[in-house]
Amino acid sequence: MFGFEKLDVWSKSMDLADVVYRLTKDFPDYERFGLANQMRRAAVSVSSNIAEGSSRESKKDFARFIQLAFGSLMEIVSQLHIAQRQGFIPKDEANKLYAQSKEISKMLSGLKRSLEQ
Protein backbone atom coordinates (compact mmCIF):
# COMPACT_ATOMS: atom_id res chain seq x y z
CA MET A 1 0.00 0.00 0.00
CA PHE A 2 1.28 3.46 -0.88
CA GLY A 3 1.38 6.11 1.83
CA PHE A 4 -1.33 8.31 0.32
CA GLU A 5 -3.75 5.35 0.27
CA LYS A 6 -3.69 5.40 4.07
CA LEU A 7 -4.87 9.02 4.21
CA ASP A 8 -8.56 9.49 5.03
CA VAL A 9 -8.61 12.69 3.00
CA TRP A 10 -7.45 10.80 -0.10
CA SER A 11 -10.14 8.15 0.43
CA LYS A 12 -12.82 10.81 0.85
CA SER A 13 -11.60 12.64 -2.24
CA MET A 14 -11.95 9.39 -4.19
CA ASP A 15 -15.53 9.12 -2.91
CA LEU A 16 -16.11 12.71 -4.03
CA ALA A 17 -14.87 11.86 -7.53
CA ASP A 18 -17.27 8.91 -7.64
CA VAL A 19 -20.18 11.22 -6.79
CA VAL A 20 -19.12 13.84 -9.34
CA TYR A 21 -18.89 11.19 -12.06
CA ARG A 22 -22.30 9.81 -11.11
CA LEU A 23 -23.98 13.21 -11.08
CA THR A 24 -22.42 14.48 -14.30
CA LYS A 25 -23.31 11.41 -16.36
CA ASP A 26 -26.87 12.73 -16.55
CA PHE A 27 -25.88 16.22 -17.70
CA PRO A 28 -27.22 17.23 -21.11
CA ASP A 29 -25.18 16.06 -24.09
CA TYR A 30 -24.18 19.62 -24.91
CA GLU A 31 -22.42 19.83 -21.52
CA ARG A 32 -20.45 16.60 -21.96
CA PHE A 33 -17.33 18.51 -23.03
CA GLY A 34 -18.18 21.59 -20.99
CA LEU A 35 -19.17 21.74 -17.37
CA ALA A 36 -19.38 17.96 -16.88
CA ASN A 37 -15.83 17.48 -18.14
CA GLN A 38 -14.53 20.39 -16.07
CA MET A 39 -16.13 19.04 -12.88
CA ARG A 40 -14.72 15.59 -13.51
CA ARG A 41 -11.23 16.92 -14.16
CA ALA A 42 -11.33 18.97 -10.96
CA ALA A 43 -12.59 15.96 -8.98
CA VAL A 44 -9.78 13.77 -10.31
CA SER A 45 -7.29 16.52 -9.54
CA VAL A 46 -8.09 16.56 -5.80
CA SER A 47 -7.06 12.96 -5.14
CA SER A 48 -4.28 13.10 -7.74
CA ASN A 49 -2.61 16.08 -6.11
CA ILE A 50 -2.78 14.42 -2.70
CA ALA A 51 -1.15 11.31 -4.15
CA GLU A 52 1.52 13.20 -6.06
CA GLY A 53 2.31 15.45 -3.12
CA SER A 54 2.83 12.49 -0.84
CA SER A 55 5.69 11.36 -3.08
CA ARG A 56 7.63 14.58 -2.60
CA GLU A 57 10.74 14.58 -0.50
CA SER A 58 9.86 17.57 1.65
CA LYS A 59 6.84 18.49 3.71
CA LYS A 60 6.91 21.92 2.09
CA ASP A 61 6.45 20.37 -1.36
CA PHE A 62 3.71 18.08 -0.07
CA ALA A 63 1.94 21.12 1.43
CA ARG A 64 2.09 22.87 -1.95
CA PHE A 65 0.30 19.92 -3.59
CA ILE A 66 -2.30 19.95 -0.81
CA GLN A 67 -2.92 23.59 -1.69
CA LEU A 68 -3.40 22.57 -5.33
CA ALA A 69 -5.87 19.89 -4.24
CA PHE A 70 -7.71 22.53 -2.22
CA GLY A 71 -7.90 24.77 -5.29
CA SER A 72 -9.39 21.95 -7.34
CA LEU A 73 -11.93 21.35 -4.60
CA MET A 74 -12.94 25.01 -4.71
CA GLU A 75 -13.41 24.65 -8.48
CA ILE A 76 -15.85 21.83 -7.83
CA VAL A 77 -17.79 23.96 -5.34
CA SER A 78 -18.08 26.82 -7.80
CA GLN A 79 -19.02 24.50 -10.65
CA LEU A 80 -21.55 22.80 -8.39
CA HIS A 81 -23.32 26.13 -7.94
CA ILE A 82 -23.44 26.62 -11.70
CA ALA A 83 -24.72 23.08 -12.30
CA GLN A 84 -27.39 23.46 -9.65
CA ARG A 85 -28.48 26.87 -10.95
CA GLN A 86 -28.78 25.42 -14.46
CA GLY A 87 -30.94 22.59 -13.15
CA PHE A 88 -28.42 19.86 -13.93
CA ILE A 89 -28.15 18.66 -10.32
CA PRO A 90 -31.12 18.44 -7.92
CA LYS A 91 -30.83 20.62 -4.82
CA ASP A 92 -30.65 17.66 -2.42
CA GLU A 93 -27.77 16.08 -4.39
CA ALA A 94 -26.03 19.45 -4.61
CA ASN A 95 -26.32 19.85 -0.84
CA LYS A 96 -24.77 16.42 -0.26
CA LEU A 97 -21.85 17.17 -2.59
CA TYR A 98 -21.39 20.55 -0.94
CA ALA A 99 -21.25 18.91 2.50
CA GLN A 100 -18.68 16.38 1.24
CA SER A 101 -16.60 19.21 -0.18
CA LYS A 102 -16.76 21.11 3.09
CA GLU A 103 -15.56 18.06 5.02
CA ILE A 104 -12.68 17.49 2.60
CA SER A 105 -11.71 21.17 2.73
CA LYS A 106 -11.35 20.95 6.51
CA MET A 107 -9.27 17.79 6.20
CA LEU A 108 -7.01 19.36 3.58
CA SER A 109 -6.55 22.45 5.71
CA GLY A 110 -5.63 20.34 8.71
CA LEU A 111 -3.17 18.26 6.71
CA LYS A 112 -1.58 21.37 5.24
CA ARG A 113 -1.23 22.91 8.72
CA SER A 114 0.41 19.75 10.06
CA LEU A 115 2.86 19.67 7.16
CA GLU A 116 3.82 23.30 7.70
CA GLN A 117 4.67 22.83 11.41
Image (cartoon, rainbow, N blue to C red):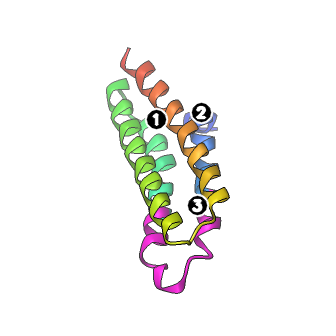
Outermost residue toward the bottom in this view: 29
Residue wearing tag 3? 20
Q: Position of residue 30 (x, y in %)?
A: 47, 85
**Of the residues shown, which amino acid type is indicated by label 2?**
Leu
- Please say if 59 is above or below 117: below
Q: CA distance from mark 1 to mark 2?
A: 10 Å
| Range of residues picked out in magenta | 18-39
**Of the residues shown, which amino acid type is indicated by label 1?**
Ser
Type of secondary structure dominating the magenta stretch: helix
- Dot placed on the residue nearer the N-terminal end, 3 or 2: 2
Drawn side of residue 20 relative to residue 52, left or right? right
- Kindly report which numbered mark, 3 or 2, lies closer to the viewer in this rendering: 3
- Dot placed on the residue nearer the N-terminal end, 1 or 2: 2
Q: Residue at x 61, y 39 (%)?
A: 5
- Please say if 62 is above or below 82: above
Label 1, secondary structure: give it: helix
Label 3, secondary structure: give it: helix
Residue 54 - label? 1
Drawn side of residue 73 relative to residue 94, left or right? left
Quadrant (top left, top right, bottom left, bottom right) of the C terminus: top left
Task: Please say whether residue 75 is one of the residues in the magenta stretch.
Answer: no
Residue wearing tag 2? 7
- Please say if 66 is above or below 93: above
Q: Position of residue 109 (x, y in %)?
A: 45, 29
Drawn side of residue 88 relative to residue 66, left or right? right
Number of residue marks: 3
Q: Nearer the viewer, residue 35 or 44?
A: 35
